[in-house]
Amino acid sequence: MLVPELQSLAQLFALLSGFSYYIGFAPPDILRRAWQEPELRAFLGRAAALPRLPTTEAILQEIADGAASALGVSHATIGLWDADAQLLRGPLDPTLPAYPLTADIPAMQVLRTQQASFTPAFADPTTKKTYALIAAPITAGEQRLGVLVAYTTSAPIFATEDVALLSLLADQAAVILESRALIDEAARVQAREHVTRLKDDFLSAAAHDLKTPLTTLVGRTQLIERRIMRSPTTPIDLASIQTLVREAQRLKRLVQELLDAGRAEQGQLVGERHPINLAALAETVRSRHSSARHPCTLEAEEVVMATVDEHRIEQLVENLVENAVKYSPDGGAITIRLWHTEEQIHLTVADHGIGIPASDRAHIFGRFHRGRNVDDRRFAGMGLGLYLCHAIVEQHSGQITLTDTVPQGATFHIALPYRPEGAVHEALNLSH
Amino acid sequence: MKPSILVIDDDPAIVDLVRDILEFEGYQVAVATNGCEGITILDQVHPVLVLLDMRMPVLDGWGFARVLKERGTRVPIVVMTAAQDAKQWAQEIRADGYVAKPFEFDELLHAVNAIKFPGMA
């Protein structure tokens, strides 16, 4: 009964001994190739995802690592050909010099000839070491992208097939880099389209808002003209003139806001900075807006020095307090608080008005965005106010955030970097 | 005496302007600052024409037109808006005319005078 099983066991032993015999005499490069195959498979498996890595450096590093492990050597690197400067650069190793096309190194020979090559002993003048290396051109169509180099300091273990394998990997690298370039280009086109759309929105919203005061200015002046033509002795009524003045000023404010938005977009909203006392600035704004309907209080330390663009920071606080008044149509207290820690200056403006719905919060600082609970005309405005506030704070390296006021209303919180006394004095000295 | 016209716009400066121009031309004018208020005043004054802004709080121009249609109230409407698509919006609510802001004195009058008021020669 046991005989057939013993037989098969004997067959198995025979097979295993044959296999070990083969392993003992097999050429080492074939063996190595068999051992490296999983690495090669792993690299090819990852290759499709590589163009989407966050940076070109990360992509190059993955390709180099993949090539090194597929060839079973310690190192691989990539030189990228900068066609404008006519230099080969090594972005993976910042210590490497940039080589001109004439440089006498294997990578440049490969780039010149567009032929992969094996150099058994290359004496590197910079590291004073001798390397065995193979290099293959990374080329997409006619376009030279760079060179893939695999190298090792140990005895030359490369086989002829390795040159062909590295060439294949270099071709793969070319495909990956080309895809990356296409992805980048698509992103650039998309970004341009997005900017164009924003500009269109900007223009149509601006045109809409400018038309309203303009309608009054055009229509009312023509009405005054007709009245005088009909009965030249009738005096011009004061109310009409007051309307004209008010609407002209409204137009002026809108135009100024538009110009500021343009500056903000270019990051040029904030101008020269000088040390000022923010507490005094906040008090000026507070007194300007405080009324019986909207009592405005300031809770602040006596002196909070900051090196800022005074005009813009005043505009910022003014905008927030104006908003607080505007969006508290039934009246209500407004509180400005100002304090500082070792690192930051904090300023909050809190109201008890209509508040800001949760769904609007993500966009509230975007250009032209207005809250969903904001009646378009009941609360006039172009939706630029908070966009400008955000730009002013950001250009002062600060943050602006929004929280609820309990039980209702909105609180805007600004945090600016606090410059200790020394820095303030320095700034004072510099400005004099 | 010329008939009465209802002006609905949420911008007080525009409402004042349109009222002053129409009164200067001898019309009677009633005003409202949103569609909802407009419906109430419409029932009181029975205007021969409504000058209607489209973007308004509470009840906008579309809402106003829908309420009139649902009630079967027939009154000519001239849309008055600062939006770029004034003509399209006027068509959407089957208005009898439109005037785009900023309008000239005469443009407003032309738009109003183009309407054939019932009972007028």
Image: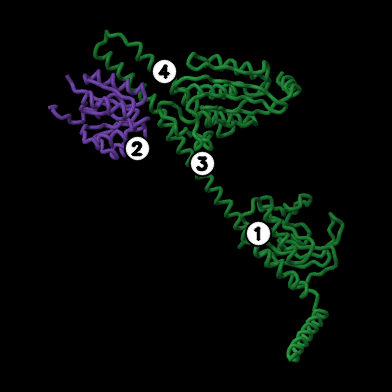
Give the Cα distance between marks 4 and 2: 28 Å
State which mark lies toward you, 1 or 4. Answer: 4
Is residue B82 shown left or right of residue A337? left
Q: Are marks 3 and 4 on the same chain?
A: yes
Residue A139 seen by the camera: no
Q: Amino acid at mark 3?
A: Val
Is residue A171 shown left or right of residue A71? left
| Chain depicted in purple | B
Give the Cα distance between marks 3 and 1: 33 Å
Q: Is residue A429 above or below residue A78?
A: above
Q: Is residue A92 above or below residue A35?
A: above
| In the foreground, A3 or B25 | A3
Report in which chain the residue with disc 2 lies.
Answer: B
Q: Is residue B36 above or below residue A137?
A: above
Return the residue at label 1: A144
Q: Are marks 4 and 2 on the same chain?
A: no
Give the Cα distance between marks 1 and 2: 53 Å
Return the residue at label 2: B85
Q: Amino acid at mark 4?
A: Arg
Q: Are the residues flagged by discs 1 and 2 in contact, CB closer than 8 Å? A: no
Q: Sequence order check: which comes first, mark 1 or mark 4?
A: 1
